[in-house]
Amino acid sequence: MGVADAVVAAGVPISSVEFHTADGAEVASVPMPAVAREDLPPAVGVTRRAFYSALYDAAVAAGAKISHEKTVEAIADVETGVEARLSDGRITRYDLVVGADGWASAVRRLRFPNAELPQYAGQCVWRGRVPRRGKGSLRGYAGAGRTPR
Ligand SMILES: Cc1cc2nc3c(=O)[nH]c(=O)nc-3n(C[C@H](O)[C@H](O)[C@H](O)COP(=O)(O)OP(=O)(O)OC[C@H]3O[C@@H](n4cnc5c(N)ncnc54)[C@H](O)[C@@H]3O)c2cc1C
């Protein structure tokens, strides 16, 4: 999509994942491989707001028309494509509908009403933002009495 440079500029580079016990002892540090271009950091820590802005700007520049405050309520196959009914009552015809509407996808429910829904797996994470020291890394701390795996 050509958004890598904008995302890197908006964030901080991350090159390893570090696992810690609850009292801060480092258990392991796993370097991340470069997966995109050699001149880019392996990963980037970026706020959602900045990340979404980069995606939004690239989509608009590519000609996408973005509608806000409307949801998809029904989809139906028609001879020349797909008709989607939105929550404002409007019915629009498209060549193709891509359901990229998250874990509770309405498109999946409309298309596959019997599909199993994702279930809570029992895991929980607290996140916070703190001043950065040293090189950029993603740090995980296991809960008290737990060992990072
Ligand atoms: C607290 C938290 C922290 C996370 N941290 C990270 C992280 O650090 N790194 C990482 O890689 N991932 C992270 N994730 C996971 C990441 O956010 C998700 O995997 C990713 O957002 C999924 O993208 P998606 O496009 O499938 O769905 P979403 O990002 O959920 O987007 C779905 C979109 O569809 C829209 N929508 C929903 N229903 C309808 C409808 N009926 N009609 C029209 N539109 C609809 C929603 O408004 C939304 O804009 C985190 C998730 C959470 C909850």
Image: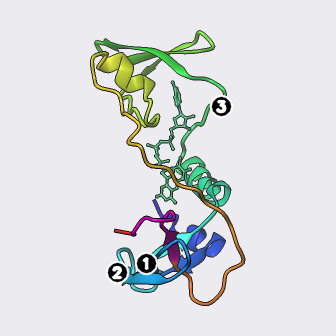
The residue that appears at 59% across and 15% down in the rendered structure is: 87
Quadrant in which residue 74 is drawn = top left
Coordinates of residue 21 in the picture (x, y in percent): 48, 74
The mark nearer the N terminus, 3 or 2, is: 2
Residue 90 shown left or right of residue 142 in the figure: right
Quadrant that contains the C terminus: bottom left
Residue identifier under label 1: 42
Return the residue nearer the eye: 25 or 50. Answer: 25
Compared with 91, 60 (above or below) is: below
119 sits left or right of 125 in the view: left
Residues drawn in magenta: 138-147
Residue 31 on the magenta segment:
no
Answer few, some or many: residues within 10 Å of disc 3's Cα (few below 14, many 20 plus, some between 14 and 19): few
Q: Earlier in the sequence, mark 1 or mark 3?
A: 1
Instruction: Assess whether mark 2 and mark 1 are in contact (beta carbons under 8 angstroms).
Output: yes
Q: Amino acid at mark 3?
A: His
Q: Is residue 128 left or right of residue 24?
A: right
Q: x%, y% of residue 43?
A: 47, 73
> Judging from the image, what secondary structure is the residue with disc 3 in?
loop
Up-down: is 85 above or below 43? above
Q: Which residue is mark 3?
A: 68
